Image: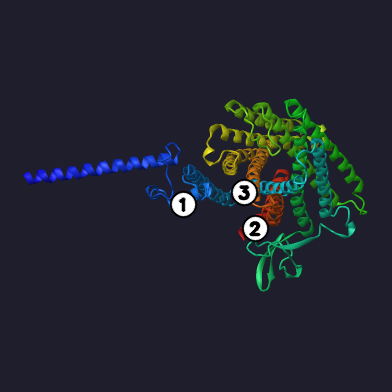
């Protein structure tokens, strides 16, 4: 018993001594950390090379300290801040990686979904996103390059005149490019674009879409057949080879040049809005948008007259001239709708927040816009109200006698496109405000940072994917009543707005990425231009062949079923190729 007491006393004494030692060591550590934070005395500061401090500091922390404050530095208050920034950066990259992988795999699910409407919606959203991304790369690169040579104190009127010149340049390039591709004014009657031929229809082959000599086709009757090439049977299809190729090229370059022309028009209208006398008043901002639109519409009328006068320059007026006119008119409508919708939303954002965003659509860093939930909901509501009003006007006048007039019908169709794009810009702006007001993205740099823009684009993309399933149910129910096609057309208008919304959201993320990469070089403006050109040259051929073609076939299917109640041969061919 006595031995047990002595043993217990010894254990308690050792435990007490150990606790006292740990407390003293903790006090020394607290004193050292206080020195690191800059709150202790000079004698208590933590020295990286001191024996009392070298052990709790890691080698990376000491290296970071020396890098920030120099080799002669004795203490480093930025060390802890660097670790915090590293954690935020790791969290942002992790979120981006997980979100991107899930987003890409979701696209694979949707483009192979059983419902053909879901596939069509997905291809349309993808095509719009890629086209806007490519157009932004080209336009921003050229703009950054020429702005580099403009002095900072240049008068706004001179910059406005230069922007007008660039707008005319892109517009003329649009007209000439489509005229050359269509062959409307330079080929004559020697080329027959309606001549039929056979193309390889096996999507698993590298030569998919190439023409096959007629002698190698077994059965020349019907739209589909089999050809023997090097002893191997290959699926082929009959089509108007020259016309289909030109339609694909025209759709590609008309879409890209329409976006470039629209961005140039935004540059003109945005410069006018930021000039003295316009930038401080909501109604003057709207007036600047109206002036910009009047200039665009007047130019369209002039171009229409020129096309009518030059249609017979090659001695014949045929389907090439009609194709040229239709494609250019649609591209002009897209460019005008893009410009007026953006400038209108700029004015609405100024009215609600009191701060006029920059031409890029982002508020200045030094400004503090008045953002709260009523203003956020107000911007959402204004966008939705404008879209609904334009769609209602379209449905009210589409069956009237005035709608048969070519110019009136074009204005109404353009107004419908403007409503969809205005809705997209409003949702994008209000979503950015919502991210700012809720501070949910502060941990990754804020809503206007590169990571914030990317996360916002992913969120809006997922929201659009979810929305298309609900819209598909509505359209499927409308198909049960064959006499009512208005619901289906309304759904397609909403899908167009969603595709524009997703495209614009990714446009902001791409703009941040290009700027971040180019700023790492000694010549950022030249790097911006070259990088945009190289990426565009690599993306455009793949987009035209593998994405835009799918959109065109699905669109043709919808037009044929709504007009004749039967499936299009092009769409049947698409299903045939998917099966192979």
Q: Which residue bears the numbered disc 1?
A: 60
What residue is rendered at 36% in x and 42% in y? 29
Q: Residues within 10 Å of mark 1 (few under 14, many from 20)?
A: few
Q: Position of residue 147 (x, y in %)?
A: 75, 44
Position of residue 310 in the picture relative to residue 517 (left or right): right
What residue is rendered at 69% in x and 71% in y? 229
Quadrant of the image occupied by residue 445: top right
Q: Residues within 10 Å of mark 3 (few under 14, many from 20)?
A: some
Q: Earlier in the sequence, mark 3 or mark 2?
A: 3
Quadrant of the image occupied by residue 455: top right
Q: Mark 3 near mark 2, Cβ–Cβ under 8 Å? A: no
1 vs 2, front mark: 1
Considering depth in this image, is 156 or 115 the residue closer to the camera?
156
Q: Position of residue 532 (x, y in %)?
A: 70, 52
Quadrant of the snapshot with the N terminus: top left
Q: Which residue bears the numbered disc 2?
A: 576
């Amino acid at each position: 018993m006595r031995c047990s007491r002595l043993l217990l006393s010894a254990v308690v004494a050792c435990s007490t001594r150990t606790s006292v030692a740990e407390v003293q060591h903790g006090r020394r550590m607290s004193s050292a950390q206080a020195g690191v934070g800059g709150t202790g005395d000079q004698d208590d500061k933590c020295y990286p090379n001191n024996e009392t401090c070298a052990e709790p500091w890691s080698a990376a922390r000491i290296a970071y300290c020396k890098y920030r404050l120099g080799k002669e530095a004795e203490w480093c208050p930025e060390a802890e801040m660097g670790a915090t920034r590293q954690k935020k950066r790791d969290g942002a990259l992790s979120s981006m990686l997980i979100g991107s992988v899930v987003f890409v795999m979701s696209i694979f699910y949707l483009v192979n979904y059983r419902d053909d409407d879901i596939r069509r919606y997905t291809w349309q959203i993808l095509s719009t996103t890629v086209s806007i991304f490519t157009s932004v790369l080209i336009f921003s690169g050229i703009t950054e390059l020429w702005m580099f040579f403009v002095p900072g104190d240049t008068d706004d009127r001179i910059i406005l005149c230069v922007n007008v010149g660039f707008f005319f340049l892109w517009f003329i390039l649009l007209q000439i490019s489509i005229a050359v591709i269509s062959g409307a004014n330079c080929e004559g009657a020697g080329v027959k674009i309606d001549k039929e031929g056979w193309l390889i229809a096996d999507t698993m082959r590298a030569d998919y879409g190439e023409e096959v000599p007629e002698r190698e086709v077994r059965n020349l009757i019907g739209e589909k057949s089999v050809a023997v090439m090097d002893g191997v049977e290959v699926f082929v299809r009959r089509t108007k080879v020259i016309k289909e190729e030109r339609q694909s090229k025209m759709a590609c370059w008309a879409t890209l040049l329409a976006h470039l022309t629209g961005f140039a028009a935004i540059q003109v209208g945005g410069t006018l809005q930021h000039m003295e006398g316009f930038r401080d008043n909501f109604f003057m901002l709207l007036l600047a948008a109206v002036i910009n639109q009047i200039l665009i519409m007047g130019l369209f009328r002039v171009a229409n007259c020129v096309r009518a006068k030059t249609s017979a320059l090659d001695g014949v007026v045929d389907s090439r001239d009609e194709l040229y006119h239709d494609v250019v008119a649609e591209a002009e409508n897209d460019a005008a709708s893009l410009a007026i919708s953006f400038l209108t939303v700029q004015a609405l954002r100024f009215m609600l927040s009191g701060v006029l965003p920059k031409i890029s659509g982002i508020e200045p860093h030094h400004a503090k816009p008045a953002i709260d939930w009523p203003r956020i909901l107000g911007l959402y509501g204004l966008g939705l109200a404008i879209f609904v009003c334009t769609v209602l006007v379209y449905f009210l006048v589409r069956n009237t006698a005035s709608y048969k007039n070519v110019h009136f019908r074009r204005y109404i169709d353009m107004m419908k496109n403007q409503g969809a794009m205005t809705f997209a810009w409003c949702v994008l702006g209000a979503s950015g405000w919502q991210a700012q007001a809720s501070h949910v993205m502060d941990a990754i740099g804020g809503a206007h940072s590169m990571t914030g823009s990317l996360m916002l684009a992913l969120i809006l993309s997922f929201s659009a994917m979810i929305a298309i399933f609900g819209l598909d149910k509505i359209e499927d129910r409308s198909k049960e009543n064959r006499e009512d096609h208005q619901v289906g057309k309304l759904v397609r208008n909403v899908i167009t707005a969603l595709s524009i919304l997703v495209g614009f959201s990714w446009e902001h993320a791409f703009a941040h990425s290009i700027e971040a990469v180019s700023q790492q070089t000694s010549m950022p403006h030249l790097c911006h231009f070259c990088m945009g050109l190289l990426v565009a040259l690599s993306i455009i051929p793949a987009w035209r062949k593998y994405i835009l073609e799918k959109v065109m076939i699905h669109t043709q299917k919808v037009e044929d079923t709504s007009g004749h109640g039967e499936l299009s041969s092009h769409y049947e061919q698409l299903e045939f190729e998917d099966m192979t």
